[in-house]
C-alpha cells in the first residue's frame, strides 16, 4: 500500500452540492487508485463545536454515511467510520494540542468566520477544531486528503504539526499529508451570492442545493439563482467579474465532467434563459439517483449501521497502533 487516502465531513445538516463536487466526487474516483486504501469519516466530535441538537446527532451521522454510500463510496473497498467511536482521535488531539501554537489557531479563517465578532466567547472546541482535524489525519498516517479549497489552511496546520512532532521527538513518525484539491468544484459558491461559498450554515436554503432536494426543488433553486442579464461570452476569461455566472458554469462543468472553457464555448451568445434549463437537466440527472439511493438506505438503516461497524473496526486497528506508538515516543508510563 503506497497511498492512504483519508477525508471526513461533519454531520451538521445535509450535504450540499459543494460537499459533493468539492469532496465526495473525488473520494469516489480515488477508490480506483492502484495501491491505495481509503478511509472516510463522519466527524461528529467536530459537529459539537457549535450548538447542536443531541437528539438528532446520531441520525445526522447515519444520513452522512448514507450520502457517502449513495454518492458512490463502496464499503467493500473503503472504510466509513464514525470519529467518536474511535477514542484515539480525542487522545491524539490532546497530544498534538500541546504542540499547536495559539497564534496560528487564531489566524484560521474558518475560526474567525464561525466565531464572528464575539471570538472571546467562542468555545475552546471551536478554537481547537483544526487540531482535532490534524489528529483525524495523522492518526491514519494519511498520505492524501481530498477536500474543497476551504480546508487548505487546516491541512497546512496538520502538515506543520506532523513536522513539529517529528522534529521535537527526533523520529520521522508522522506523515505530512498532501492536500488533494482538484476539479472544477473545489469552491462552489452560493446560488444567491457569488462572493460567498455554498455552505450548510447559510440561513437561506435557496443558496444551496442539498443532496436531499427532489427534482422540483433543484429546478426551483436553479431558476431562482442569481445571475446577470448578459449572454455567456465565448471564453472563460471574459467571465471575470461575473461571479454568479462563473459559478453556474463551473457547476455545470463539474456535474457534466466537461471543462468549464468548453461549457462556455458551447453556450456562447446564449443567455441564462437557455443555460439554466440545461443546468437543471444535468443537475437532476446527476443528483436524483443519489437522492433516491440515500432515501432507500435511510428507510432501512441496518445496512448503514453494518457498514459503520465494519468501518470503525478497520479504522480503530490503525488508530490504536498510532496512538500506542505516539505514547511510547512521548515517553508515557505504560
Ligand atoms: P465540512 O463538513 O464543512 O465539508 C466537507 C467537505 O466539503 C467541502 N466543501 C466544499 N467544497 C467546495 N465548495 C464548497 N462550497 C464547499 N463546502 C464544503 C470541504 O472542503 C470538505 O472537504 N473540517 C472539515 C471536516 C474534517 C476533515 C477532517 C476533512 C474534519 N476532519 C480530516 C478532512 C480530513 C469540514 O468542516 O468539512
Image (spheres, helix red, strand yellow):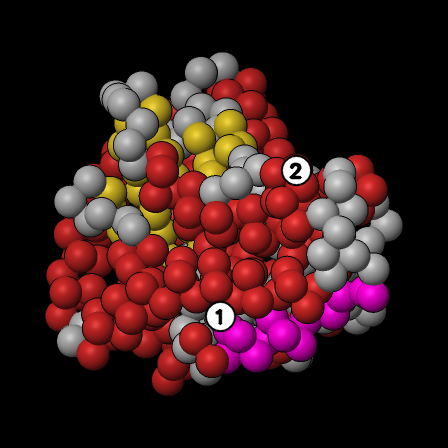
Task: Return the residue at label 1.
Answer: 210
Q: Is residue 315 above or below residue 174?
A: below
* Vertical side of 95 occupied by 218: above or below: below
Instruction: Please name whichever residue, 85 or 324, is drawn nearer the observer in this view of the structure.
Output: 85
Q: Of residues 34 and 81, which is closer to you in this image? A: 34
Specify the quadrant that holds the N terminus.
top left
- Answer whether residue 224 is magenta in the image: yes
Q: Is residue 139 visible?
A: no
Seen in the image, is 139 located left or right of residue 106? left
Q: Secondary structure at mark 2?
A: helix
Assign a secondary structure to mark 1. loop
Where in the figure is residue 272, as x and y percent of width and height? 70, 64
For disc 2, the marked residue is: 261
* Residue depicted at x 52% and y 66%: 280
Q: Position of residue 290 (x, y in %)?
A: 33, 63
> Would you place residue 321 above or below residue 195 in this image?
above
Magenta part of the protein: which range?
A: 217-229
The percent coordinates of residue 174 (x first, y second) are 44, 25
Q: Going 40% across and 61% down the picture, which residue do you hit?
A: 285
Amino acid at each position: 500500500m503506497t497511498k492512504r487516502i483519508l477525508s471526513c465531513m461533519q454531520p451538521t445538516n445535509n450535504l450540499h452540492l459543494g460537499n459533493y463536487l468539492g469532496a465526495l466526487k473525488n473520494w469516489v474516483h480515488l477508490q480506483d487508485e492502484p495501491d491505495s486504501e481509503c478511509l472516510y469519516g463522519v466527524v461528529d466530535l467536530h459537529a459539537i463545536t457549535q450548538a447542536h441538537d443531541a437528539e438528532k446527532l446520531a441520525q445526522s451521522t447515519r444520513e452522512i454515511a448514507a450520502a457517502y454510500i449513495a454518492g458512490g463510496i463502496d464499503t467493500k473497498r473503503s472504510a466509513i467510520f464514525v470519529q467518536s467511536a474511535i477514542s484515539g482521535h480525542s487522545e491524539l488531539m490532546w497530544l498534538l494540542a500541546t504542540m499547536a501554537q495559539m497564534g496560528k489557531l487564531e489566524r484560521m479563517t474558518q475560526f474567525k468566520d464561525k466565531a464572528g465578532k464575539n471570538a472571546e466567547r467562542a468555545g475552546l472546541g471551536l478554537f481547537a477544531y483544526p487540531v482535532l482535524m490534524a489528529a483525524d489525519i495523522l492518526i491514519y498516517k494519511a498520505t492524501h486528503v481530498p477536500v474543497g479549497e476551504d480546508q487548505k489552511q487546516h491541512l497546512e496546520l496538520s502538515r506543520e504539526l506532523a513536522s513539529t512532532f517529528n522534529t521535537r521527538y527526533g523520529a520521522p513518525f508522522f506523515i505530512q499529508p498532501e492536500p488533494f484539491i482538484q476539479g472544477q468544484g473545489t469552491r462552489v459558491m452560493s446560488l444567491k451570492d457569488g462572493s460567498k461559498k455554498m455552505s450548510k450554515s447559510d440561513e437561506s436554503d435557496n443558496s444551496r442545493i442539498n443532496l436531499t432536494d427532489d427534482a422540483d426543488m433543484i429546478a426551483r433553486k436553479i431558476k431562482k439563482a442569481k445571475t446577470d442579464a448578459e449572454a455567456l461570452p465565448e471564453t472563460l476569461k471574459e467571465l471575470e467579474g461575473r461571479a454568479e455566472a462563473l459559478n453556474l458554469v463551473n457547476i455545470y462543468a463539474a456535474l457534466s465532467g466537461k471543462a468549464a472553457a468548453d461549457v462556455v464555448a458551447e453556450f456562447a451568445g446564449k443567455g441564462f434563459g437557455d443555460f439554466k434549463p440545461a443546468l437543471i437537466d444535468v443537475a437532476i440527472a446527476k443528483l436524483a439517483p443519489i437522492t433516491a439511493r440515500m432515501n432507500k438506505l435511510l428507510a432501512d438503516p441496518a445496512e448503514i449501521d453494518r457498514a459503520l461497524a465494519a468501518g470503525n473496526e478497520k479504522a480503530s486497528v490503525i488508530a490504536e497502533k498510532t496512538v500506542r506508538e505516539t505514547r511510547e515516543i512521548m515517553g508515557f508510563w505504560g
